[in-house]
Amino acid sequence: MDWDKLRIFHAVADAGSLTHAGDALHLSQSAVSRQIRALEESLNTTLFHRHARGLILTEQGELLFDATRAMTKRLEAAEARIRDSVEEVFGELRVTTTTGFGSLWLAKRLPKLYAQHPDIKIDLMLEEQVLDLPMREADVAIRMKEPSQADLIRRRLMSVKMRLYTVQPYLDQYGTPETLDDLTSHRLICQNTRSTQVNAGARLAQELLAQNVPSVLTVNSYFGVLQAVLNGLGIGILPDYVTEDHPQLIRVMPETESNEVPVYLAYPEELRHSKRIAAFRDFVTAEISDSQHRLRVAHNP
């Protein structure tokens, strides 16, 4: 198949119109139409259904469009990697991290990164599954444990602990628990211990649930736990990094907390010189440093 014809086919399929594709490609409608007709003849198939309002892909057209879409993404990624060799930050960066950290801490800080590097494209993949960085399932990861895969550059960012938080209206209504035994008159909000999560958080939840807490809400993400806590539903097990952005949270039973959870940033050795990786690494490192400084000042005015 002719690469130029495939490029034109992709533009037409994406636009759903010969005219709009021609405008994007700076070609006349008749030139675009001839190329599509030639491609259909070479494949001996029909790629589009024509109707008054535009074009609809046939089943064969859908198959080809899937292929050209994948090719386009690969070419864009290749272009971005090539342009990484010059002094600019450009192109897609696939970032993977946990749902909790990504939604509660990282996402709301990304406007600063885009302000610094407006041409970067972040593909943020929030999931508990550990993606394979050497196999390029993602470019960079923020993980709640030290990565074990070989050929990775890793950097410890900070440590996190799971602690107990609630809000003042809840304490006004139900009182402040002082001991584990006091939890029998409170509602506990936590991640379901069967949900994929950091071991330290699951262990703390299991220990507290063993106190025969009568009223419990379990959620499969820390985002859900936080929303329930902020709305005065009970006492939640949450990572301590949420407190800076939600100063209304009040820590209770300060002697009760999880073991320390190390947070690492990791990326493949082959991306050592990537400008996009460097920009993201420096951004995250600076944000964490600033956050920790503000928390120290708040605790030691």
Image (tube, grey):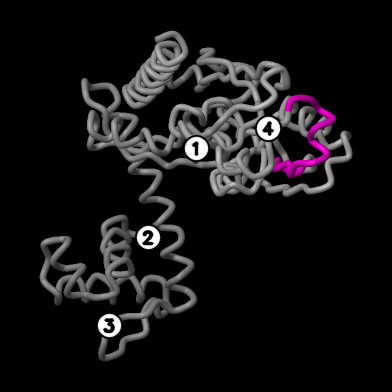
Left of 95 or right of it: where is 55?
A: left
Which of label 1 and label 4 is nearer to you? 4
> Which residue position is annotated with label 3?
54
Between 22 and 92, the one lying in front of the other is 92
Q: CA distance from mark 1 to mark 2?
A: 47 Å
The location of residue 261, given as percent across then percent down, is 65, 19
Label located before the other in sequence (1 or 2)? 2
> Which residue position is annotated with label 4?
176
Which of label 1 and label 3 is nearer to you? 1
Label located before the other in sequence (1 or 3)? 3
The location of residue 227, given as percent across then percent down, is 55, 47
Which residue range is magenta in the image? 178-192
The residue at the far bottom in this view is: 52
The residue at the point 57 percent across, 20 percent down is 263
Neighbour class for label 1 at 10 Å: few (<14), some, many (≥20)? some
In this rendering, is residue 97 above or below 23? above
Label located before the other in sequence (1 or 4)? 1
Q: Are marks 1 and 3 in contact (CB under 8 Å)?
A: no
Q: CA distance from mark 2 to mark 4?
A: 72 Å
Which quadrant: the C terminus? top left
Q: Quadrant of residue 6?
A: bottom left
Q: CA distance from mark 1 to mark 3?
A: 43 Å
> Which residue position is annotated with label 2?
1
Taking the magenta stretch, the answer to whether it contains residue 182 is: yes
Describe the element under mark 2 as helix, strand or loop: loop
